[in-house]
Image (cartoon, coloured by chain):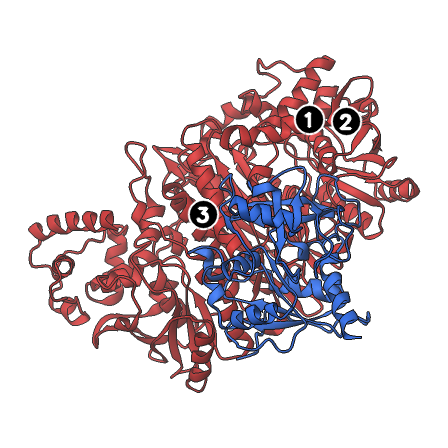
Amino acid sequence: MSERVDARLETADEAKNEHAEFGYVADAVEHIEGRKFNIDTVKHAEETPDTPLPWAELGLKEDEYNRVVEILGRRPTAAELAMYSVMWSEHCSYKSSKVHLRQFGEKVTEDMKKHLMVGIGENAGVVDIGDGWAVTYKIESHNHPSFVEPYQGAATGVGGIVRDIISMGARPVAVMDPLRFGAIDHPDTARLVHGIVAGIGGYGNSLGLPNIGGEVVFDSVYQGNPLVNALAVGVMRHEDIRLANASGVGNKVVLFGARTGGDGIGGASVLASESFEDDGKPAKRPAVQVGDPFAEKVLIECCLELFKSSVVEGIQDLGAAGISCATSELASNGDGGMHVELTSVLLRDPSLTPGEILMSESQERMMAVVTPENVAAFEAIMEKWNVEFSWLGEVTDTGRLIIEWDGEKIVDVDPRTVAHEGPVYDRPYHRPEWLDGVQADTFNSSSAERPASREELKAAVLELMASPNMCSKDWVTNQYDRYVQGNTALAMPDDAGVIRVDEETGLGVAVSTDANGRYTYLDPYQGAQLALAESYRNVATTGAVPMAVSDCLNFGSPEDPEVMWQFAEAVRGLADGCQELGIPVTGGNVSLYNQTGGVAIHPTPVVGVLGRFDDVARRTPSGWREDGQAIYLMGVTKDELDGSEWANLRGHLGGKPPALDLAAEKLLGELLINASRDGMIDAAHDLSEGGLAATLSDMALRFGVGARIGLGEVCERDGVDLFTALFSESQARAVVSVARSEEVRFKDMCSARGFAHIRIGVVDTENQALDFQDQFSLPLAELKEAHEGTLPKYFA
Amino acid sequence: MTETPLIGDFSPAPDSGLSGARIGVITFPGTLDDRDASRAVRIAGGTAVSLWHGDHDLKGVDAVVIPGGFSYGDYLRAGAISRFAPLMEQVVDASKAGLPVLGICNGFQVLTEAHLLPGSMIKNSHLHFLCRDQRLRVENSNTAWTSEYEAGSEIVVPLKNQDGQYVADEKTLDELEGEGRVVFRYVDVNPNGSRRDIAGISNAAGNVVGLMPHPEHAVEAGFGPDSSAFGEVELGGGTDGLGIFTSVLKKIVAGAK
């Protein structure tokens, strides 16, 4: 707190000296000294057109500020400037990404929209999963706040995405967190890992939301820019879907939940638009919001009761840009006007200025529109849950958003110009010149030795499974509650998290999030498609039918044409890929400026695919258990080590990512889904990072059951050596275990569809080892120790 | 104020002969596992009745479960505010008259804060929230909530908490041991530094039981430890927690005859 005030005093003092006559700056100073508050009203703005405003400090560019003046026909008031600056920030307006994101809406067929009840643009997309049930889900980033203040940044990331889900009328039922950190042994990594994991757990566990998956990746490119993405899933009946808009002239506008404080002020515009530091120390702590999960849990139950009792017309969550965002979005999505008295806002900190109240990102707040008849019913529900509320104003049809301070007009704007008509940039981009050189530098042309002997191969598998990216993530996921709500059918470390929606029928959903920054660095178009393919494959591997996509696009600065090219290519790839797979993008989030000191992260489009189960009892876990079951490898292995986890372990990043064949992915998905539905397979795990070595190790460790494996035929058929068979990351592959009685059916199914499949072994409950016959044997205890020891070694 | 819509959408229990037994499940602000506890009661064959913390009405239930969660955010001490809830007065009085009461996790913490059970829970020794499938030994099968188990038998149920380290002074611990009031003990691993590996205890009469692990999350095959444990629980198993609920239901039905 004090840090923030000090900072403001500093700038305020400087500004005061320069522009002693300017009311806005003087106000803040006088106010802190406890004297009368002098407000920059619309009238004052009209009378003092030449007053300079701190638009640059608030993150606006000169032409953007001039555009605000043009829209208003006068200079903005301090409060209006605050609103425009946060709502026109990259984070809220998508000004650099919009022109590319349009493809997600354009590259869709009617068939893809069949199950889409609410698409891009609302708080979260909604998918029809049948039987009158709908699922809403969305993934968002909270990268910058989590670097500055790991615990609160990560915690409020969960809180924010959950409020998006609630505002659609859904009960949140699960969360997932894809995380990316710098090098595991960097001194700053432990600070971030501990804070972020504890923050996610502390918030999500207290909300009673099972955490069913995600990712944990370590790579030095994320050292100054960790990625903290948060996904939430909600379920509702079709008739319960709500869209946030303010319609019905005369309806009341109410703010409820936590009080408004000084936290997160300027977070949206300041944090996401520049790098953090000069000297390696976070300097903007006060701009990060502080979370109160208990308040949010009460808010969830309270909102669901409001919806169920039909006492609200619409609810809008307050996230980035707080009241600025909620009022302007509600108004522009409804009848177009709203009148608000800002002094009615309940404050935690009475010294806040109007502009700060409008920008505050205090958590656990909601805004609702209520008809006058329902006011009493609304208040009764607030009282039951002990939730504070205040009536702020009402819906009008004037087309203006009017905000008053003690009866004096401080905001008078067309809400659409704030919420929807912000600047749009078609930023220049070009393919980086260095890319040809990187792509020519293949792993096979590098000096890295390829393990060949039995001892070397055994050591290589152990090294892989103990490596930061492939090791067990139990140390992280054991800090999350995966059981609460009692509907979790699969969670980490399975391919996807699976949640039952309907207890009677077993109807449910699967969700997986995936990305590979190295692949996307080597080829952004294909890398994004590979992320999509992996997520799709993971969902299908559990037996669910993929239905929809949500994405979180984490990139560097859009002002760098090479980064912008990566972004443009990744979006194009993703949109094309979705069209080919026939599943729509339902929403998502863009996080830009993930770069520090001119160095950008690997382009990291995280893709979350959602799939549907008729009955989650049919889900396929990722480990085998039954003695004697046959183990099959589906798909073909090529020599594809560029960008692989193995190459990464040898410090190599070059060449081109593995070839992509979305038709093969789709076919593999169909086979896995059929096999699950018809009870042919008892275990399935896809092949991705770490290749077959990782998949077989995971499957054995899942339930602690060994197997005897022979890869001679695979090597012969595919023309690869044993090392390549084990470590190549060729796509469209999976390993399944098949009951003996189902083997003929399974083989016939694959043959009939022309999909390569080959028997590579048998489950062996007697021998506690993963036994590569005639090669080497990995005792499960040794493998488990290597796999599970890594994270505790660094963080416990 | 007796309705708690959207928390526990309880459908009627299957006809098992036990459905006449009504078990109340209390919801506080911040309670999380109330719907899960109700589901467990239902799966065990009983009828779940939702109870609201702010009421003064036990609705004539035959037993009470105080489920897990973070009531009032656990910002003070876990359970320290909930013990003052209006309904807790009824629970305390009724328990003294013999009403079976089970506190799970946060519910256990509420029971110690309400002085229905001795000792207290502090932060886990490793300072992290921990979610794991935990092996327990049922030490006492004579309580209202454990009669369906054999003394000495072992069960696996999920454990998930931040403040799970059971502590009490040595004299109290000796008393608990001497009177056979240690009901559940951690086996293989002491997950949180609890004194003498204690996972759950009872009052002297055996009608009030509290434990940190979550038996309500081990009542349904496919949604409990069978799908996640390291091969420890057989496929289609993972329902070791069900006995807690059938114990009390059978006791209630037998007592009614």
- Is the residue under label 2 in contact with that under label 1 (CB below 8 Å)? yes
Residue at the spot x=45%, y=33% of the render?
A190
Vertical placement of B206 versus B150: above or below? below
SS under mark 3: helix
Residue at the spot x=46%, y=43% of the render?
A196
Shown colour of chain A: red
Q: Residue A422, percent across and down?
A: 35, 59
- The earlier-in-sequence mark between 1 and 3 is 3
Q: Chain of mark 1?
A: A
Give the spatial CA distance, label 1 vs label 2: 9 Å
Residue under disc 1 on the same chain as residue under disc 2: yes
Residue where numbered disc 3 is placed: A154
Q: Is residue B133 left or right of residue A58?
A: right
Q: Amino acid at mark 1?
A: Leu
Specify few, some or many for label 1: CA neighbours under 10 Å numbering under 14, 14-19, or 20 or more. many
Residue where numbered disc 1 is placed: A783
SS under mark 1: helix
Q: Quadrant of residue A729?
A: top right
Q: Is residue A231 visible?
A: yes
Residue under disc 2 on the same chain as residue under disc 3: yes
Q: Residue A684, percent across and down?
A: 76, 41
Chain represented in blue = B
Tell me the number on the disc at residue A770: 2
Specify few, some or many for label 3: CA neighbours under 10 Å numbering under 14, 14-19, or 20 or more. many
